Structure formats: structure tokens, C-alpha cells
Image: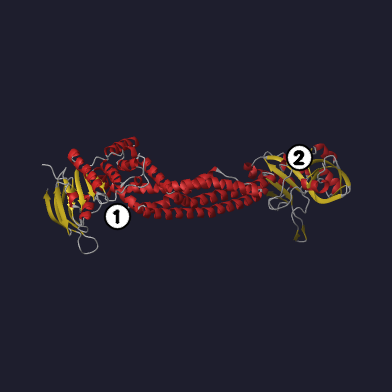
Amino acid sequence: MIIGALLGEGWAAMLANRMRTLLTMLGMVFGVGAVIMMMAIGQGAQLMVNESIASMGSNLFIVLSGSTSAGGTRQGSGTVPTLTMADSQAISELPQIAAVAPNIFNSAQLIYASNNWSTQVAGSTPPILEVRDWQVVAGEGFKDSDIRAATRVLLMGQTVVKNLFGDENPVGKIVRVKNSPFLVMGVLAQKGQSLDGRDQDDTVLVPITTAQRQLFGNQFPGMVRMILVKAKSADVMAKAEQEMVDLLHARHRIHADKENDFSVRNLTALAQAAASTTEAMSTMLGAIASVSLLVGGIGIMNIMLVSVTERTREIGILMAIGAKNSDILLQFLFEAVMISLAGSFIGAVLGIACAYFYSQLNDTLVVVTLSSVVLAFGVAASVGVFFGFYPARKAANLKPIEALRFQ
Amino acid sequence: MTRPLISVSGLYKQYLANVPVLKDINFNIESSEFVAIMGHSGSGKSTLMNILGCLDTATAGHYYLQDRDTASLTSDELANLRNQLIGFVFQGFNLLPRSSLLENIALPLLYAGKSKPERREKAIQMLNRVGLAEFGERRPNQLSGGQQQRVAIARALVTDPKLILADEPTGNLDTQTSEDIMKIFHDMNAEQKITIILVTHEPDIAAHAKRMIVVRDGQIESDKST
């Protein structure tokens, strides 16, 4: 009951000196606003990184063929043709594997009408779209029958479409790849940049058999350069990797003491490293912004100290009519907390508005989470208590007669 | 046998300077007395009143209030005494300028832990008693000095104290208003048997009291009934 009344007294004191209250609040307004805005921008950046990770395809492995060794000089991976279509087929039958797409690629020149463009031509099978989480936005994808018949069809990435066709609809048109005519069956959805900055849309997909037999040729029939593998879920990544290694061990008849003639790379692990970098950056932004919360708190302490001095006589009167030290302490503490809470509220609104404005201005993603707002509020309230305590105690410890005599 | 309400013995008060402000003060005040403490400015009469009001503490000697040694009380217990037992009326009124008259009068009840409706009802009642019922929502600076002092008296009486300490209550008022205020003191002493200690340097104000203690240079010069 007395708490409620003291809250009321604190509130009245706040209203009584609006200008001073407002100026004190400003510190908290900017502090909380900065924290919320920084966290929103940081979390937005994190979300964008996560999206670009997802664009690579989730739960993704790449199986590469091994390296040659010529007279002691070892070559890079992929230089010895050890992976085959049959390996790819065998991997797809493993229990933890969702989809498998063998892959060979090389660059080639594409020509349409008076335009030409050099791009990466990748030969693969229909599951490539599932493995890489890639949609066909116009026309359709190729089918198993295209693989069997090695038809000259292709799916075109957005960058290639832009360079060859401009605004024209490419579906159903004929382009020349290495001077052979190919039918554009479909257009792939935009994927944007990969984590290392490559343009993932600057590519065309053709049936793998077509690539092997008609475009690039190969020394050994059925050889593939790499196999893209998608595990069933993130949880089974380790298990899936082990199964694959064991399978290829057996199929390639590699003794335990010999080195593998293939390598398996977990792309998700790489992506997670990138994600944790942005997370660290986001945390750092938040930390820098919290310094302004601290500064706002010191502002509150400053003004409250002035206020205590200014109201010393009033405190004396209150003590003369029976206010206990604890009553005075609570009253000033409530005032400090109310100022900081009201400031945080305004700051939160301002911070969210600024974050939204920033996202409109820079066309980036910002995410305001409830937790960041709650955190900023909690910190602000504690700052109010912490920095309000010293002035409040100073007021409470005044001697009644000295306070009353103060001019 | 009833103990005196106030019993002061061998009271000394000394600030940092070597000259004591009060020297060896001894007197008793019984319940429902009307006492004037007189003296020139600098005589130590205000210091004496502050000690009697538990706003200040003595350097040496004893001050028993309702048979309790005030030197042994904690600051919270002293605050309770000021709240429940004592009402103050000051020369400068000491009303809170930002609060309405009713809020000012109700304030001691807040620290006594009374509920809001109870506080308000009692405050209205007190304001009626000092004849300012229609000004309840005004601020103190919208009133004349005499009206403000009446509000201060209402505030002092709101907790039904046994003792009113008035420090030069008429010092800022003209003669006619002073007489009105003194009449209120007189009435509450006569009707409610409230003990009143009045500090003043004006003989005609002191004449309202039934006993006069004259303080000079920190010592009691005379103590006689009138």
C-alpha cells in the first residue's frame, strides 16, 4: 500500500519537472534505441548468411575423386578418375541419403542469336535440383529419359538468361553450346552469391550423359568428377559420411593401410564457420551499443544527484512529518527506475523504427526479436536501480534538521 | 502517578565551535500544557525545539518523550514518533509547493500507512476544520500566508498527535492573522487537550500560553506560569 503511494510520489516528482525528466530520459532513449537497432541489424545479417548457406543446399556433401601421383609429384584432387556413375548409384541406395547427383563440369561458350556468353556447363542427373534445393521457375526440368537418351536439352541459370536473352523468354529457344544446338527446357530460380562470392546463377545444367558423350568427352566411360550428396537431415550427417566412406572403401577395394582415392567434404561445416563469424559480429555490435546504456545510466545518476540537492528542503519536510529513511530511499529509487523504464520504452519504439528505416534505405534484412527488446528493457531497469541507488541513499541519509534548514 | 510527557534533564548541545548552544537545560512538560519558549534570536530556543521535535539530537543529557529515552531510539523509531506523536508548524509553513492542499495535509498519513480513501477523507475533514474546505485542490502558492499556515496546522493535526511544536508560527504574518492563528492553537489546547509548545520572540504571542520558559544564551533564565 505504501509502495503504491511512494510510486505515485515518484511519478508526481517526474511530472513536476518535465524538462529535466525528459533530458534525463534521453540517455536511456538513445541507449536502448541503439541496442535494439544494433541487435536487429546484427540478427538480420545473421539471417542473410543463413539464407545464403541454405541456397547452397542443406546437409550437403561433396565426394571428390582422388589425386594422381606422377613421379612423386602429387596432383590436386579430382585429377584421377576414380568415381563413376555406378558409385553414385550405390551411394543413393544408402539408408541416410536423401538424394545424389553425379556431376561433371567444364566451361563452354554459349551462343544465341548475336549474343554469346562463356559459362560453366554442368552435366548432372534430375536429383541435382533436390540436392541443391533448386527450383525451376519456367519450363521444366529434365527427366531420366533425357539421361538415357543423352538429349541436347539444358536448364539455364538467371545470369546466363540475362546475358543471352535479356528480357526475352528463353524457354523453348535453341542455343548453341560448343556449336551444338541445345533446347532450353527450363530456367532455374535465382540463388545469388555463394559464401565465397561466386555467382551461383552463372551456370547451365545439361544431362550428364550428354555432357560426357557430346560436350566434353572423357577418357573413361561413366567417370564423374564429383558426386553431390544430400543427407536426410542435419542430425545424420556424421553417420551418412561414415556410410559413404565405408561403401566407397569396399567398392574401390582399398586396403586399410592405403590412402583413399576419394575425399568427402562436408560443406555445412564450412557454412557454420561463416555463420559463427556473423554471430560474433552481431554480439560485438550489441556490446558496443550497451556502452551507451551505461552512459545513459550515468546521466540518470547525475540528474538524480542534482535533484536530491534541489529537493533537500522538501526531503526535510517529509522527514519532519514522519517519512522514514527507507521511504525516502524508495521514493527516489522509484523515480530513477520510472525515468529509465519510460526512457527505454521510447527508446525501444525509436530503435525499432530506425531499424526498419535502415532496412528500407539499404535494402537489407533486419530482425527485431522479442529477446533483444526484453534484454534492453531489463538492462535499462537494472541501470535505473543501480545508478538511482547512490543518489537515493544520499537523500535518505540526510539528517532531518540539516535537510530542513537547507536553503 | 502519570509521568510527564516531556522530561529534559542536563541537556547540552554543542556544534563544532566550542561555545555550547544549550547548557544544562532541565524542565518537565505535562500533557495538555500550553508552553511558550521565549528568547532572542541566537538564544538557542530553536535548537531546543528541534531537539524536542526529534529532528536533532543533544550532545549530552537526557530527553525523555513519553518516558522513552530519545537517545536510544533508531532513526525509524524517531520517524514514527514524529509521525504519530508530534505535529510541526513552522514559520515558513514548509508546505510542498507542487502538491495540492489536500495532498499536503494527507502526506503524514501516507507515511503512517493509511489507505488512499482514508487519507483523503481525513484530509478533507481537517481542511474543513481550518475553514478552507473550498480550496482543497489549490496549490499553496495560491493562498495567503495566513491560509497557508492554517493548512500547515491541518497537516500537523491530521495524525491526531499529542504534541504540537510551533516554531515562530506567526513570524511571517500580520497582527490580525496572527491572532486568528493563535486562536486555533488556543482552541485545540482547550478542546482537545493537545500539548502545545510555542517558540517565539514576541511577548504578545507568548502571552497566549499558560507557561513561559525564557531562554537566554543557551540557558533557562526563567520558567513560570502566567
Q: Which of B178 and B192 is in front in this view?
A: B178
Q: In this view, does A216 lie to the left or right of B108?
A: right
Residue B153 visible in the snapshot: yes
Chain of the residue under the numbered disc 2 shown in the image: A
Q: Is residue A213 left or right of residue A382?
A: right
Instruction: Give the alpha-carbon distance from disc 1 to disc 2, as whole Å.
Output: 85 Å
Q: How crowded is mark 2: few (under 14 residues within 10 Å), some or many (20 or more)?
A: some
Residue B71 visible in the snapshot: no
Amino acid bearing label 1: Arg
Chain of the residue under the numbered disc 1 shown in the image: A
Label disc, if present, on residue A136 of the rendered structure: 2
Amino acid bearing label 2: Val
SS type, badge 1 = helix
Q: Name the residue under label 1.
A: A405
Name above or below for residue B20 compared with residue A63.
below
Q: In this view, does B81 lie to the left or right of A197?
A: left
